[in-house]
Image: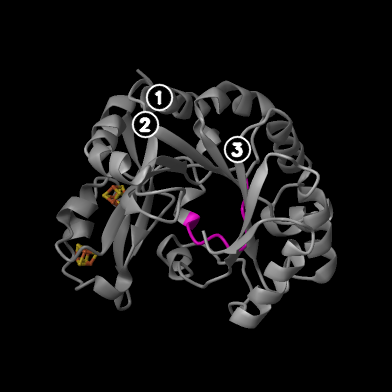
Amino acid sequence: MTGGIVFDIKKFSVHDGPGIRTTVFLKGCGLRCWWCHNPESQHPQPELMLRPNLCIACGACAVTCPQDAIHWDSDQYVTDRDRCQRCGTCVEACFANAREIVGQEMTVADVMDEILRDRAFYDQSRGGVTFSGGEPLFQTDFLAELLSACKAEEIQTVVDTCGYAPQAAFDRVRQDVDLFLYDVKLMDSARHRRVTGAPNDRVLSNLRWLSAKGHRIIVRIPIIPNINDDEDNLHETARFLRTLSAVERVDLLAYHRIGVDKYDRLARTNPMPPTDAPDDSRMTEIEQLFRDYGLQVKTGG
Ligand code: SF4
Ligand code: SF4
């Protein structure tokens, strides 16, 4: 049975598709969106995350690290990430919960055990399971087996995707997906590349293809001030989406700053310039813009 790297399983979610859901977050993504609020999802392998504010400087991590990767420097313990093998020994040693390994290997059976525990809630609420990420299709084999196992249990399935995956990967899983939550960010490919690290041709062609195949799709658009909230991009996005007959609705997701501290905890630079969330009146204007193109629109997931 295939295994994969899971970085979180969230129970009782009500924002990742219909009803009450269990959301399984798979690690790994081919995009590097500046505004990503789950940067720990991007790298495919487990990673060490630190919470220096919780550290009580006891030194237990430094003593136990088999790689000698943790040292006292001036006034704090610092971790040499080049030496770190992400073994998790220091996490066990740290009573202050200042250290965490994000991402663990799980088998399909492990994940299904978690999913099946909440079956009663899915049945009562017409909910089910959502596979998110990262980009869940980054682990296509694992995702395909998980979806197939859910279908064998007659559990409704949603895949939350950024669309940046080979069409063959979508083709592999699509028969076991009841609904796609599909991100669209920018219509201009050069702008898309600048803020996500990749052009948008694959994202848009996969969406067009899934729609032509008649799959249920809700498009999700993050509204990021000064990145994609200009009139040109919004109108072009709306014009594109109205040509796709399978798109049931457009969900507008207002940018928020939750998660920015995670970059520090991963020792990475946050690429997003300081940006305020769009206010309610701007979100209402954008909602109306999409509605004027005949699209069903909702603010929020
Ligand atoms: S995860 Fe392992 S190798 Fe990395 S710092 Fe902790 S104990 Fe050392
Ligand atoms: S074990 Fe935890 S609390 Fe102690 S020094 Fe290391 S990180 Fe800080």
Residue 88: x and y in percent read 26, 47
Q: Which residues are magenta?
A: 31-39
Q: Label 3: few (<14), some or many (≥20) within 10 Å?
A: some
What colouring does the structure picture have?
one colour
115 relative to 152, above or below: below
Disc 2 under 8 Å from ligand 1? The reply is no
State the SS at label 1: helix
State the residue position of label 1: 151
Tell me if I can see residue 279 in this picture. Answer: no
Disc 3 under 8 Å from ligand 1? The reply is no
Q: Nearest the camera: 138 or 49?
A: 138
Q: Amino acid at mark 1?
A: Lys
Q: Label 2: few (<14), some or many (≥20) within 10 Å?
A: many
Q: Amino acid at mark 2?
A: Ile
Residues at badges 2 and 3 in contact (C-beta under 8 Å)? no
State the residue position of label 3: 216
Return the mark for residue 155: 2
Q: Is residue 64 magenta?
A: no
Residues at badges 2 and 1 in contact (C-beta under 8 Å)? yes
Q: Amino acid at mark 3?
A: Arg
On the rendered image, what quadrant is the N terminus found in? top left
State the SS at label 3: loop
Residues at marks 2 and 1, CA–CA distance in whole angstroms = 6 Å
Image point 28% across, 25% down: which residue? 109
Residues at marks 3 and 1, CA–CA distance in whole angstroms = 16 Å
